[in-house]
């Protein structure tokens, strides 16, 4: 079971924070993270185990589980995490992006904090315009 302080990921959680705005097609920090990060970089530090790859699809086991499959990434070419287990912070059978997974694993679901952390790590385009919302 996940630590009690973590909340389950909901379908509404995929919305990026509104503090940063796109101008002229620029990508937000979460967009850049989705493009550049790997699932291994996101999941493995939190105890997830990569089991195998079949083509571009990867299969994962959740922390605390000794046998069996818990999730997949890149199913049918979609760059999403699909968790089958009900014993994680993620809602089962709902595809989530790398940015959303990172946000829940590293920032307890706080998209604003996750965005700020990604900006500090350099996930920003030079001409990204910061809003005042």
Image (cartoon, rainbow, N blue to C red):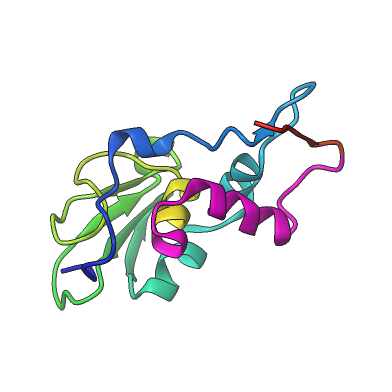
Q: Is residue 112 magenta?
A: yes
- Taking the spot 37% from the left edge, 42% from the top edge, the residue there is 96
* Outermost residue, front side: 132
Q: Position of residue 112 (x, y in %)?
A: 55, 47
* Outermost residue, right side: 126
Horizontal side, residue 112 vs residue 63: left or right: right
For the N terminus, the quadrant is bottom left
- Taking the spot 75% from the left edge, 57% from the top edge, the residue there is 122
Q: Is residue 107 magenta?
A: yes
Please tell me whether residue 67 is drawn above or below residue 128 in the rendered image.
below
In the image, the segment drawn in magenta is 105-126
Q: Position of residue 117 (x, y in %)?
A: 62, 59
Splitting the image into 4 quarters, where does residue 86 fall? Answer: bottom left
Q: Position of residue 101 (x, y in %)?
A: 41, 53
Q: Position of residue 55 (x, y in %)?
A: 40, 50
Residue in the foreground of this view, choosing between 65 and 30: 30
* Outermost residue, top side: 24
For the C terminus, the quadrant is top right
- Taking the spot 53% from the left edge, 58% from the top edge, the residue there is 38
Total marks in image: 0
Residue in the foreground of this view, choosing between 76 and 14: 14
Please tell me whether residue 3 is drawn above or below residue 124 in the rendered image.
below
- Taking the spot 52% from the left edge, 36% from the top edge, the residue there is 16
Splitting the image into 4 quarters, where does residue 70 fall? Answer: bottom left
């Amino acid at each position: 079971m996940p630590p009690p302080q973590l909340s389950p990921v909901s379908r509404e959680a995929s919305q990026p924070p509104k503090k940063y705005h796109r101008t002229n097609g620029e990508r937000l920090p979460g967009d850049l993270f989705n493009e550049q990060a790997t699932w291994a970089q996101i999941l493995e530090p939190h105890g997830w185990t990569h089991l195998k790859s079949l083509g571009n699809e990867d299969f994962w086991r959740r922390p605390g589980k000794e046998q069996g499959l818990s999730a997949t990434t890149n199913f049918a070419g979609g760059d999403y995490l699909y968790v089958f287990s009900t014993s994680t912070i993620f809602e089962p059978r709902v595809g989530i992006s790398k940015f959303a997974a990172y946000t829940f694993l590293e920032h307890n679901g706080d998209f604003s904090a996750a965005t700020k952390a990604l900006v500090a790590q350099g996930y920003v385009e030079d001409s990204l315009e910061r809003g005042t919302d």
